[in-house]
Amino acid sequence: MIRFVLSRVALVIPTFIGITLLTFAMIRLIPGDPIELLAGERGVTPERHAELRAEYGFDKPMMVQYWDYISGVVQGDLGNSIVTRQPVLNEFFALFPATVELSLCAMIFAVFIGIPVGILAAVRRGSVFDHSVMGVALTGYSMPIFWWGLLLIILFSGILQWTPVSGRISLLFYFEPVTGFMLIDSILSGQEGAFTSALSHLILPTVVLGTIPLAVIARQTRSAMLEVLNEDYVRTARAKGLAPRRVIGIHALRNALIPVITVIGLQVGVLFAGAVLTETIFSWPGIGKWLIDSISRRDYPSVQGGILLIATTIIIVNLLVDLVYGLINPRIRHQR
Amino acid sequence: MTESTQTISANDTPSAPGPLAEFWADFSRNKGALSGLIVIVLITFVALFADVIAPHPPAEQYRDAFLVPPAWTDEGTSKFILGTDAVGRDILSRLIYGARFSLSIGAIVVTLSLTVGIALGLLAAFSRGAVEIAIMRIMDMMLALPSLLLAVVIVAILGPGLFNAMLAISIVYLPHLVRLTRAAAITEMSKDYVTASTVSGAGVLRLMFITVLPNCMAPLIVQATLSFSSAILDAAALGFLGLGAQPPIPEWGTMLAEAREFVLRAWWVVTFPGLAILITVLALNLLGDGLRDALDPKLKKQ
């Protein structure tokens, strides 16, 4: 097991170095003067320009620049935002919980609907239910989620007036963040109605962000379940006279879930990409919206640091999924 | 009696159906795939003849008709079937011209990434050693970021715009194509017919593109169809984020971005461009699924 963990961790390191090369090169590839990009100063005097050049280390050889960059990264120094002059790392972690809360809720939504629906569709293969589930899943998979979000806003915020259009909580409430998760903080604050307000803000973004993972999980669960239901051991279990519920729920499901867990792990990247769109639609103050705002404000240090941190998060989560996968499935652990 | 038996045996000797006929038989059995194909043909037709079909020029602003609802509502007029947007442009006409953009985006992205992807994949498969490792490691690194995010980064570097968005999406789709090509090519290269042409003196380029490549096409065609639909979706997403096609180009995602602020006042401005994206992408995905089922021999036998 230790060998397995170490080999997986070793595989991640070159990927991480590759990402740092990408973000390092990014600032230098953008057309225009990197000093102006990094310092946000336009029309600087030649003296100030040289001063800044030395300050940012652009006068050093490329290798030395990269070394300086990566030693900064390892120590958590990702530079300062041009707009707010705050360290990029602080900005990122101030907004990160909002994205995590939204992504977690979306994932829970997708898993708790997708898996049961997928199982039922497989068990009733060829039924009307099966066909409609697969039809809806394919539609969900093809959905431009930015449009889906707008449609839900028209229906639930416009016509029915059930949910608010944007933000994380009504402006009537204010409390200091404790966990950064609005649902938990609103309960901790003890203010009446705060939790309901936070929940009502969360519902539509959750549905929008969860739609594509839901479709993928339902499809994957169905096909994995169909495959397992054809196995000999399932037939044996049935022949022994076990209740169908037990055969499907315990014998078949356990093996069917292995590929489903892989797919759930792969959805982490999808969630981050989707968060960019979902947060933009609902003005959700998370890192997706922050990234797009930083791009439009030409705040390149923030974009550079944000991409590095998002990629690192995805790499770490994928690594964890990989390890958990090895834990539950010995066949993976003992490969090679 | 005997005569008729003879004619049958003479004309209908059990000759195997050609690969194309067999493919079509498998493909047309799939109703979803067939309807996807029909929709795509229709959209292509609309895109090609946009000048004739569209009732109004796409950029024409009717100053007396801002945010007119669709024709079937009470305030609508038959002049603007799907209504007008905030500056008085006919939405239907813009959607029709938008089909041109979306289909060209898909076609250009697929051509670009398929060409480069096949070249890199074959290069990796044939060179082995350091070149192969370098290519495959770079592709792995690109897979660490989700494709839309990587495209956002590339557009942030290159600057927003339709051309740069297409370029970014093409780059982002490379890893899957390179991996597929390399895997298929390596499998083929171990087969006898490749050894035979090597022995008979075929050059590397001939081996790559004439001997091996045609036998690797099935998975690549499927991936290309699915990339076509994701390219349309991703380009629309970039347009929506303000990083793709810039107004007043009637690209569907860009139209949605312009319509966002009217979401609660004028539902039709928001609804129709998104519906166009959904229908196109859905049809392409149905088509891709059908192609995969018809081309994948493992699935065919079931």
Image (cartoon, coloured by chain):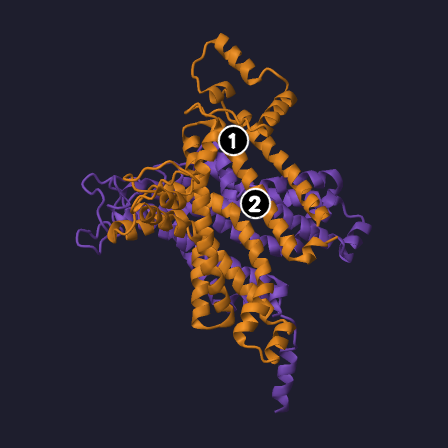
Chain colours: A orange, B purple
Residue type beneath disc 2 = Val
A50 over A285 or under it: above or below: above
Query: Do dots 1 and 2 share one subunit?
Result: yes
B138 vs B155, left or right, is right
User: What's the residue at 69%, 58% (across, down)?
Assistant: A331
Q: Is residue B52 visible?
A: no
Q: Amino acid at mark 1?
A: Gly
- Of A74 and A42, nearer the camera is A74
As drawn, the label of residue A37 is none
Find residue A8 and report its horizontal and vertical position in percent. Answer: 67, 45
Where residue B22 appears, as percent x and y from the top left, is: 59, 67
Nearer to me, A208 or B37: A208
Q: Is residue B223 visible?
A: yes
Residue A147 at x, y percent in the picture: 37, 48
Q: Which residue is mark 1?
A: A305
Helix, strand or loop status at disc 2: helix
- Viewed as shown, does residue A149 lie left or right of A14? left
Q: Earlier in the sequence, mark 1 or mark 2?
A: 1
Please identify the quarter of the rendering in which residue A232 is found.
bottom right
Query: Which residue is at the far top?
Result: A47
Task: Identify the image quadrant of the N terminus of chain B.
Answer: bottom right
The subunit letter for the residue under badge 1 reads A
Read off the residue under disc 2. Answer: A317
Tag 1, which secondary structure? helix
Q: Residue drawn 53% across and 75% down?
A: A244
